[in-house]
Amino acid sequence: MKIAFVIPKEDDQHNPLNQRSQGRIFPPVGLARMVGIVGKQADVSLNDERLDHTHTVNNAQITIIFVNSYNQQRACDLARHYHDIGCLVVLTGPMLSHSLELDHSAVDCLFIGAGEDNLADFLADYRSGKTRRFYRSEKSKTTSNQNGRIFENTALSLAS
């Protein structure tokens, strides 16, 4: 199994923080945990566009894309790209608990809450051929979205 972890570059190229400083300021801490969970079960690659602007396709079966406040549009563009070449696309990251405005049309799974809390269950489901649309960590079940509603209730409307 091949898994590609992708950290998209920022959407706004006029942001005062350049790509390299963003990479140092916002390191993907959850990524190390997720790679540790995968362990030797899969061939793992990392595409961090904040540090390397050349984007390569690596024949991954699963692509896990990290969404943040500064890269939502780019994350959706990459999701469409990977979906079109046949990858199972997963979105994870802090914005998924707060934003219902992302284009989920090319996304197979969403990790709500900490991605590392959901990855082991997702991989077990993937191996059995029964992945779910949403994976929620226990902590995220009480996370409110920007409108003050419980995200778990509103996320069900995205599934239809």
Image (tube, rainbow, N blue to C red):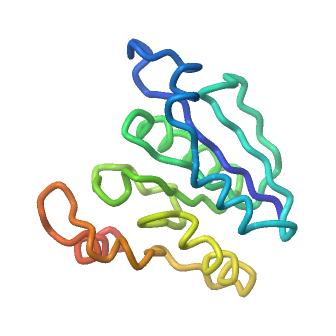
Identify the residue at horizontal 86%, vertical 58% (top origin): 43
Q: Nearer the viewer, residue 123 or 37?
A: 37
Identify the residue at horizontal 65%, vertical 76% (top origin): 120
Residue 40 occupies quadrant:
bottom right
- Expressed as whole percent of the image width and height from the top left, the position of residue 3 reads 75, 58
Q: Nearer the viewer, residue 75 or 114?
A: 114
Above or below, 160 against 129 in this view is above
Quadrant in which the N terminus is drawn:
bottom right
Q: With 67 as the anchor, is 84 left or right in this view?
A: right
Q: Nearer the viewer, residue 160 or 69?
A: 69
Identify the residue at horizontal 58%, vertical 49% (top origin): 29
- Expressed as whole percent of the image width and height from the top left, the position of residue 28 reads 57, 44
- Expressed as whole percent of the image width and height from the top left, the position of residue 99 reads 29, 53
Above or below, 69 against 102 in this view is above
Q: Nearer the viewer, residue 93 or 27?
A: 27
Quadrant in which the C terminus is drawn:
bottom left
Above or below, 37 against 28 in this view is below
